[in-house]
Image (cartoon, rainbow, N blue to C red):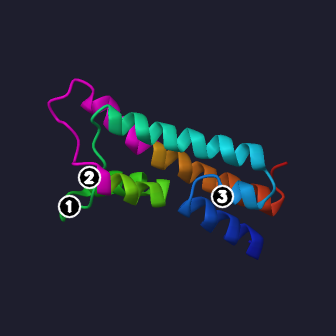
């Protein structure tokens, strides 16, 4: 794995789209940033939960690691979210959106690495 691949992947992990931006894929970068931010925002507006680590709760902690895939956006969401509104009819859907935003970005991190390594045009 080249140094460029590592840098692109690290940037993509910190801020969605930034790895693609570094690699000159400006349109993709903007689109990916908008997609991840939109998914996270919809999840928060729907009253979804932003997972946080709880000792001894394996499934919760796995979900937390997935949600953390959205990078700095995860930490911003944790600051503004209050754990979700469990009584809201949209709680489960909102939680799925917040988790999916992180998981989507983890796939985009791998995509940036593949582009930097020349495995993908």
Q: Between tags 3 and 1, which lies in front? A: 3
In this picture, residue 27 sits left or right of residue 62: right
Judging depth in this view, the residue of 58 and 9 nearest the camera is 9
Classify the position of the N terminus by image quarter: bottom right
Q: Are marks 1 and 2 in contact (CB under 8 Å)?
A: yes
Look at the numbered disc 2 and give the secondary structure of its residue: helix
Range drawn in magenta: 79-100
Q: Taking the image as drawn, is residue 69 in sight?
A: no
Q: Which residue is mark 1?
A: 54
In this picture, residue 83 sits left or right of residue 42: left
Residue at x 69%, y 48% (from the top left corner): 29
Residue at x 47%, y 44% (from the top left corner): 101
* x and y, in percent, of residue 4 in the image: 76, 71
* x and y, in percent, of residue 53 in the image: 26, 61
Q: Which residue is mark 2?
A: 60
Judging depth in this view, the residue of 27 and 51 nearest the camera is 27
In this picture, residue 19 sits left or right of residue 43: right
Judging depth in this view, the residue of 81 and 119 nearest the camera is 81
Residue at x 64%, y 52% (from the top left corner): 17
Q: Which residue is mark 3?
A: 18
């Amino acid at each position: 794995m080249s140094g460029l691949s590592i840098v692109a992947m690290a940037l993509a992990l910190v801020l969605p789209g930034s790895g693609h931006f570094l690699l000159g894929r400006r349109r993709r970068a903007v689109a990916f940033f908008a997609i991840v931010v939109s998914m996270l925002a919809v999840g928060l507006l729907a009253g979804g939960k932003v997972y946080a680590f709880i000792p001894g709760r394996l499934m919760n902690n796995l979900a937390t690691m997935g949600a953390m895939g959205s990078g700095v956006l995860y930490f911003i969401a944790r600051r503004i979210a209050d754990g979700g509104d469990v009584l809201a009819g949209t709680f489960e859907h909102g939680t799925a959106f917040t988790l999916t935003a992180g998981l989507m970005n983890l796939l985009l991190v791998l995509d940036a690495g593949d582009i930097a390594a020349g495995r993908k045009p």
